Amino acid sequence: MDLRNIHTPVLLERCVELLTPALTHEGAVLVDATLGMGGHTEAFLERIPGLHVIGLDRDPDALALAGERLARFAARLPPVHTVYDGIAEAVASAGYPHVDGILFDLGVSSLQLDRAERGFAYAKDAPLDMRMDPTTGPTAADVIATFSEGELRRIFERYGDEKLGGRYARAIIAERESAPITSSAHLVRVLTAATPGALLGQGHPAKRVFQALRIEVNGELAALDAAIPATMGTLRVGGRIVVMSYQSLEDRIVKQDFAAAVASTAPAGLPVELPEHAPRFRLLVKGAELADQAERERNSRAIPVRLRAAERLREDGPADNAAATRAAAPKRTAAPKRGAAPKHGATPKTGGRQRGAQ
């Protein structure tokens, strides 16, 4: 199987353009936080002799395929089985005090979508699994079987922006009283039956529910919320980070973390900005960059991508540590709507990758 023929890395040339200036010196280290099938990493290793890449992924199948594809670079590519919020630990374990570049390609991978047995695709019948690391943690079927109506409604509305979340939650509760819902086809039938006829032609009724289940099962937003600040802390001065996200909840987290990193920490009313209060990073692109029309036509998985990038300007100081402590309270995702159930217990942390299409 030639992996180059079964997937196309999203925004490959743009990622290379943005990260390469930080990677050309001797001994440079890049962290691919979402290794997947190795498309982005392969390009960097081919084009930059001497570059070392720490490749992270939570999916053992993806690590195995990437290892096969990148076998000729084995001496420069230590693969690590971890969630991307384990980047700082992975970097330290590899013996590096800091890194020069970081790449995130978030969301579900081509591999996970294309293998029906993983249960990510609502168009293919399969067991309701959806775990990015299939060796550990609860499945989507477990969530469907054990969550209360309020909890199901919460995740459908919060993680899928599903306006029929309450209706779908009630339908699932009613159905599981007569038969367990363990396959994607069964869940699609329940959702379709619960959808008002006038809305059936307005997109697939399972699209947002499947997204919400995937995010819940894999603890994606919690992992990302922890990963971005920790990851930025591993960059040397002059190092760069590129993040590609594929839905608004992910992009909001990245946007907020980048905004905090490029802001001054000077107290209000201070007549001058001291060096220790200056921004720690600068943005490399304005706002979120999208794929151009040519790439969107060539690679459909590039259609929703939003790319953000930043460069480190200085080391952290005491003022930054104090600001980080003040900002450590939970944030980011919107609060549950009135009447929604409290958040269910977090999914246990396991090994690492999530992505749009690499």
Image (tube, rainbow, N blue to C red):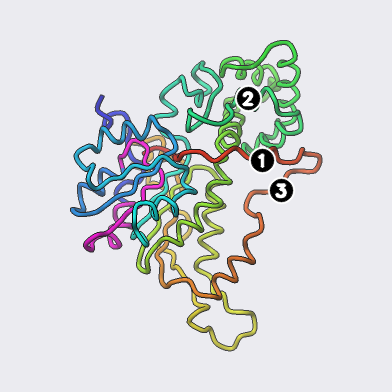
* Residue that numbered label 1 is attached to: 158
- In magenta, the rendered stretch is 15-39
Instruction: Find numbered disc 1 in the image and state the secondary structure of the residue it sits on.
Output: helix
> Which circle, 2 or 1, is nearer the viewer?
2
The amino acid type of the residue labelled 3 equals Ala
Q: Are marks 2 and 1 in contact (CB under 8 Å)?
A: no
Q: Quadrant of the C terminus?
A: top left
- Decide which of tag 1 and tag 3 comes sooner along the chain: 1
Left or right of 234, for residue 274: right
Vertical placement of residue 126 versus 34, above or below: above
The amino acid type of the residue labelled 2 equals Asp
* Residue that numbered label 3 is attached to: 335
Mark 2 surroundings within 10 Å by alpha-carbon count, few (fewer than 14), some (14 through 19), many (20 or more): some
Left or right of 53, for residue 287: right
Q: Nearer the viewer, residue 212 or 75?
A: 75
Residue 91 x %, y %: 39, 54
- Decide which of tag 2 and tag 1 comes sooner along the chain: 2
